[in-house]
Image (tube, rainbow, N blue to C red):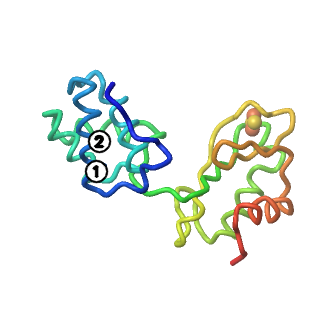
Amino acid sequence: MSKMVNPCKYEELSDEEKYELLKKVINDYQRKESNLIQILHLAQVIFGYLPFEVQTFIAREMDLPFSKVNGVVTFYSFFSTRPKGKHLIRVCLGTACYVRGGKKLLSRLKEMLGIDVGETTEDKQFTLEVMRCIGACGLAPSIMINEEVYQRVTPDKLQQILTERGYSGR
Ligand code: FES
């Protein structure tokens, strides 16, 4: 692959620069349909999510029907068509977490943030998602915020955890 910019700096790029970079990625992957998933992954890293415009761009550049690109994006849960917040909160609803209070944590988070699953707060700070087992069942219930795992979380602990991430209460 050709030289890439520091991933931490993608958000500082202009739209034009992002599309230019995406074009490079598509070329690096030789515009092959078999590389579509990898291209979409990188497009999501560059743009943060995969809106209609980005999908259209990829379809055009790869000479694929939009329905093909959109079909892959909507099939895989790791692709998002909506922008995500700075802090991605994922509540584990695997069996152990579910029975040990995961559902309560989810309700509390919805209440605190004023959003539903799949939504992002207006200030773009928090996105709420659910996930299946993250392999920390022994200390359930667990949640993840970005790459960090929190175990034995209680609804009361949530306030503290979120405050550390800049939550100021709503
Ligand atoms: S069920 Fe939640 S970590 Fe395994």
Q: Which mark is residue 17?
A: 1
Considering depth in this image, is 155 or 163 the residue closer to the camera? 163
Give the residue number, with chain letter if any, for mark 2: 21
Quarter assignment of residue 65: top left
Q: Which mark is residue 164?
A: none
Residue type, label 1: Glu
Considering depth in this image, is 148 or 22 the residue closer to the camera? 22
| Above or below for 53 versus 64 | below
> Residue 78 in the image: x percent, y percent?
48, 39
Q: What crowding class fits label 2: few (fewer than 14 Cα within 10 Å), some (14-19), or many (20 or more)? A: many
Considering depth in this image, is 161 or 118 the residue closer to the camera? 161
Residue type, label 2: Leu
Image quarter in which the C terminus is found? bottom right
Q: Any atom of ligand 1 within 8 Å of the CB at mark 1? A: no
Q: What crowding class fits label 1: few (fewer than 14 Cα within 10 Å), some (14-19), or many (20 or more)? A: few
Q: Residue at x 41, y 56 (%)?
A: 12
- Asked whether, in this view, residue 54 is left or right of residue 119, the answer is left
Question: Are the residues tagged 1 and 2 within 8 Å (C-beta)?
Answer: yes
> Residue 81 in the image: x percent, y percent?
39, 51
> Residue 61 in the image: x percent, y percent?
16, 38
The quadrant where ligand 1 appears is top right
Q: Residue at x 22, y 23 (%)?
A: 30
Q: Residue at x 26, y 48 (%)?
A: 19
Q: Residue at x 53, y 56 (%)?
A: 118
Q: Tag 1's secondary structure?
A: helix
CA gap between label 1 and label 2 equals 6 Å
| Above or below for 46 versus 113 | above
Quarter assignment of residue 2: top left
